Amino acid sequence: MMNDGILIDIESLVKKYGNLTAVDGISFAVRKGECMGILGPNGAGKTTTVKIIQCISPSDGGTVSVFGLPAGLSQRAVKAQLGVVPQENDLDPDLTIRENMELFGALFDMPKKTVRERVNANLKFVELYERANDKIVSLSGGMKRRLLVARALLNEPKVMILDEPTTGLDPQARHMIWQRLRSLKSKGVTMVLNTQYMEEAEQLCDRLLIMHKGRILKEGAPDELIKNEVGEEVVEIRNHEVKGILEKLGGLEFMHEEVGDTLYLYCRESRDILTRLAGFGSLSVLRRPATLEDVFLRLTGRGLNE
Amino acid sequence: MSESMLSHRIYYVWKRNLVSYRRFAIPSFIASLGEPILYLIAMGIGMGSYMGLVDGMPYLNFLAPGLLVSTSMFSATYECTFGAFVRMKIEKVYNALIVTPLTVEEVVAGEILWGMTRSMLSGFIMLGVLLAFGIPNWKSFLLMPLLWVAVGFFFSSLAIIVTSFAPHFDFFTYYLELYIMPMFFFSGIFFPLDRMPAAVKVISHFMPLTYAVRVSRSFIYGNADWSVLLNLAALIIAGLFIFYWAMHRMKKRLIK
């Protein structure tokens, strides 16, 4: 049953592809009006998770309830109330922008008049109204993404699912998408957002799941996660003998991590550290605020995910 | 498979293909008709002028009913192999459709319905060509749409199964060269099967087009009897099995 405004409720979800466990017993809930981010590297299980929510992939264990209904392949009622921006562009290249939108709207059994009104309104919303009669091939990558957003909104979904909506876009196009999504958020649209961009997660998400190898490593608001996992500030020291530095900093409160040629010091306040290091001679030191990227890399490891 | 997997939404898939087709109508028309017309002229008129009567009629007339169904088979086959593969793999149309309230079964059924439409269309055009050649008589053609539906249904469904296994375009060459083309030549279109060696006769029983050609000939020359009805029924029943298998196969391919 639906309670406390929980729209999506996932309990111990497992998904396997042959021998590979893509999702390994994750649990989380999405509440009405929030933007829930799933942050993780390639292969973390983000897309698999949302495909199960979308009722286009069966699970191998656990329960997934969407709008109080069990997710499953034949669950039309769930699909009818979701708006999906897929990772891979699936706009119909044989059709114009308007035809794409109108045919898609019809799939939700909406009256023709409603479809036409919403197509116009949504094309205006993503600033593609003037291009309505153009072919899909004439659009840039960013325009295609915007059109996918407009298309996903046609059925006025209860929840929007965005699977890496800005991957592969240039900065201008990315910011344009973020603006549109923030505007939807302010209208109270609930979102589930898969991303591998820290900035995207920080800009848009109220809550974040950090996912890695099919598991959820941490959950929380972006600023909370930063504060709890790495603190406020980071000092990066390059090309120096680590042991000597750590001895010199004895008694101060910080966490450290050594990766390649760099020593990372995570702390609440870096002033004391920097004062002591000042007496150390010529050091390459960088001091900066802690970011989500630090949290992410600390949790998932700074090695390559290949 | 529960009944609720199929609904009126099949029509949306069909409609999408129609809207897309309008843009390519003329080139695809020419492509799907060129071949049978070529056979009609080369074999029917060219070779026919050196032959006596076949089964008691001029060769062109013997050939006509068979080409009237083979053109229908080819249309359905091309549409649901190459056409469907492009939509599935390159244009990602299926992916976009199944995210909405549509099921994979409806996507497949819509594709097959569209294949049948194309096969019917080719049939009618071929019919127009035959009438221009003066092959009698238009009244006997009234039954043909029924046969085109059966042929279109069977071969569209079969083609979807092939597509569900296809890793790339080249895969369809095997299907066309090893199954469709031999069937085209050994299903009784070009020569009566009863004079063929026993082996060819046996093989022809496993070629669904054989049944369709038999039905077509008896429709066109007005000598339909109960056995014709059996041939037609066999084609439709086999088509139903293939159709269900096609839905099952595509689901396996698309749902992971």
Image (cartoon, coloured by chain):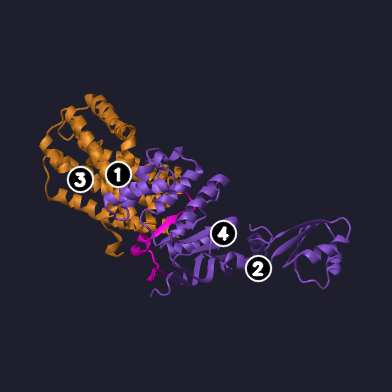
Chain colours: A purple, B orange
Instruction: Give the numbered dot on residue B211.
Output: none
Which of the chains bears the disc numbered 3? B
Count of labels in the image? 4
For marks 3 and 4, give the one nearer the viewer: 4
Give the mark toward the camera: 4 or 2: 2
Residue bearing the label numbered 4: A201
The chain ID associated with circle 1 is B
Gap between marks 3 and 2, in whole Å?
A: 73 Å
Q: Which amino acid does label 3 sit on?
A: Leu
Q: Which residue is drawn at 77% across and 71% down?
A: A253
Marks 4/1 in contact by CB < 8 Å: the verdict is no
Number of the front mark, 3 or 2: 2
Mark number, residue B147: 3
Where residue B200 is drawn, which disc sits there? 1
Near mark 4 (Cα within 10 A), the count class, few <14, some 14-19 or many ≥20, is many
Which residues, given as a range, are shown in magenta?
Answer: A65-90
The alpha-carbon separation of the residues under discs 2 and 1 comes to 80 Å
Distance in Å between CA atoms under marks 3 and 4: 59 Å
Which quadrant of the structure image shows residue B142?
A: top left
Q: Which of marks 3 and 1 is nearer the N terminus?
A: 3
